[in-house]
Amino acid sequence: MTAIALLSAAGRRIARALVLLLVVSTLLFASVAVLPGDPATVILGVRATPSQIAALRAELHLDESPPLRYLYWLGQAVQGEFGTSVGTDRPVTDLIGDRLVATLTLGLLAFTVVIALSLPLGLWMGSRPGGRTDTGVSTASLLLLSVPEFVIAGLLLALFAFWLRAFPPVSLIPAGSGALSQPQLLVLPVLALVLPTAAWSTRLVRASVLDGHRLPHVEAARLSGMAESRVLLRHLLPSTLAPIGQVFALLAGFVVGGAIVVENIFGYPGLGTLLVAAVRQRNVPVVQTLGLLMAAAVILAFLLADLLTLAVNPTIRNQQR
Amino acid sequence: MQISRRTLLGGMLAAGTLPLVAGCGGDDAQPPATTKGGRLRAGLVGSTNESLNPNTVEYSAADVARYAAIFDPLALLVGGETVLVLAESIEPNADATRWTIRLHEGVTFHDGKSMTSADAVHSLRRAATDSESTYREAFADIKAADITVLDQRTFEVPLARPRGDFVVGMIAGLGSAVLPEGITDFTKPAGTGPFILQTYEPGKTAVLTANPNYFRGAPLLDELEVVSITDPIARFNALQAGQIDFAKDLSFAAARVARGNPELQVILGGPGNSNALGVSMNIQFAPFDNPRVRQAFRLAADRKKIVDTALSGFGEIGNDIVGKGLPGYNADLPQRDYDPDQARSLLRDAGEISVSIRAADTSAGVLDGIQVYLEQLKAIGVNASLARESTETYYGDLDKNNNTPILALGYINRPIIKHIGTWVVSTALVNTQGWKRPAYDAQFNEALATADPAKRQEILDDLQRQLYDEGGDVVWGFVQGPDGARRGLRGVQYAESNPTFEKASLG
């Protein structure tokens, strides 16, 4: 019974996720379509001749209405054909290939560090509110939250790359290697992603834990004389797992967005730098595909968090949803 | 910054088309190279679509640098001079309708095959006729199907009309690069150039090794790495931290920092590798249909101040004519000086003048230059303001640009003969000065057709004088780079603003 209920709930969510992706793709398409400037002229540059421009406009179906263009693209996309990068015959998927690996490396590393930092810290702070750790970390995180990401990245650069000369400022991965083979190139970008995100997620974990401590069964366990560590592990943690899962799903969104900024500052050869360049060059197929990819990642994270909530929380699981 | 070197309509002409010294380029700003060996890492702007296919290579400055290292053209504009590269000689017939090109002997591609006229002819044909070639317009006068091979190293190019400027106006440039006949795969192409491609990761980096058999002498460097770093700040950071040795196109602020850093140096390519900046007044529109007003606007410009303020000194003043430092420039025209009093008196009869100058942040120095110029216009009593537009759309509307009373101009500095054909003749697609004079067109065509360089230069000088006296452009300066490098770097040359490294060394 529970397994079936879980599966059907999951199924409904997956269906919703697909609809969401469709909506995202429409929005993406619309936002690039309203960008000023004729895409063909922007792509070909100042010295393009009218005949070259006309040819590109025909290739991009620019003379047809936006909804029709969108449908062309959608029709291709569902068959797994995400188009070719504008101005070449190269499939978009080719272009994305190893940049995806690079960004995943950066993102997963950052994600792991954030969880490893904020989970224990948040647990500790939420269990000893007002203590020295709590006050210290809360203040530090507030500071980090108030400063824009690119300023943090700039400060990291100034301190570690130029003053201490400990790490390189630009992630120039040597030919033939991957990001992981040059760990010193990853330190600053990961730090730049981790600091603001961890600040934020530590506070949220702390808040969930504070709430968790006030739950009746947790109080009861403590009052019954159970050791604090057992209280935390066997009663608090399972109850806070669901809200913390939601926090980490949100993290995915932050990491994806933050990666775009960080990659461009450090010249990291991932999807973030590709996206900025593609928007500048009005490379619509690339922008669409990347946008969808990033949206799908975030949606997936929320899907997993929702499933975790369902699996962990019996009351919600049994409700009609 | 600008990277594409294609001319729109058939190129123009200039004097001294029959070159000259093979090998010695124009950039004498640096002492000659000395140390052998090492790897030079250069950082330039890249793009999402990098490839070494000649049809698309010019979208990325990094790709152009790689392409120029791997392939050789028949001739090139290096520094401010036309230089023969793969061609040993390029000679016209009596009326400049057929040009005979003789290639150097014994040149081989990186895979060992000999380079012959068949390869050169094939490459030229492709550039002139391929539907996606960016040189199709520039080579429109070449009768590609009728190019004849005379022997292993000689071939003849017939033209549709006499073009005395065949070399300077058409052939000198990467458009005449010689690729192996029948090449289809551009992932690891073999050229004749000073460097051999070893690895290429489009959008990221390329590593090349020195070609020990390069026909003009092996490079001093062992290796060259060309890295794509599109963000200008990241590029400068990489230079400062020693991750790269050469960074193309620094911001003025970064260049000032580099100047003050003992480990770095700023390299300027000279006016021959620059962009011309200023404003373009359309003489078809009031108040610029009045020649006194145009003259006043030209005298109102304190050119030195604009270059020092807006370009941070990284440039040279202009004299309202494009092409300074390049073949064909009329250096005899007296340098216009700042003369606000004369400007004011010229405007006295013109009444109240109000102008709104269209401009966008299309390249470094444009907007700042306009701001300084606006102050100078106000000082002579003109009610001047800035109409700022978005960079992406500024060049898009041809119609609008051809019918604007006054707008900011930024031309790639080209030999004047190319410039006139692209921007000044009545048939030009974009003619921001509104210069439409059939007699001028006829005179220009005459210059194009004249095979004798001295006679051609006479006509060109007169064409420039007409623009100097009555034209609508105010060219106040030529902005170069600026590029940054680490202190020991020597021997970087520039061909139409693209850096080449065959004579470079790290010390």
Image (cartoon, coloured by chain):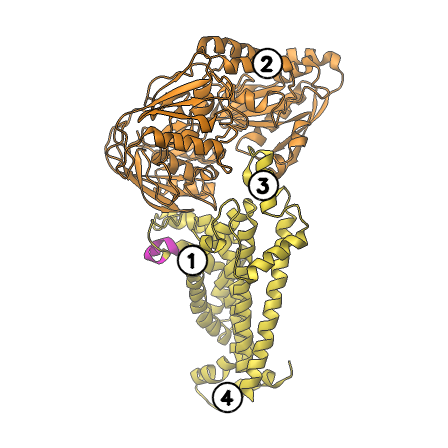
| One can see residue A10 in this view | yes
Circle on res. A276? none
Chain drawn in orange:
B
Q: Which residue is tagged 3?
A: A55
Q: Nearer the viewer, mark 2 or mark 4?
A: 2
| One can see residue B480 in this view | no
- Give the crowd class for mark 1: few <14, some 14-19, many >=20 residues within 10 Å: many
Chain of the residue under the numbered disc 4 shown in the image: A
Q: Which residue is tagged 1?
A: A190
Q: Identity of the amino acid at label 3?
A: Ala
- Measure how far apart labels 1 and 2 are at the Cα level: 64 Å
What's the magenta region? A180-187
Chain of the residue under the numbered disc 3 shown in the image: A
Q: Identity of the amino acid at label 1?
A: Val
Of all residues shown, which one is farthest toward the bottom? Answer: A224
Quarter of the view holding residue B214: top left
On whether residue B466 falls in the magenta region, the answer is: no
Circle on res. A221? 4
Q: Identity of the amino acid at label 4?
A: Ala
* Mark 4 or mark 1, earlier in chain: 1
Colour of the chain lettered A: yellow
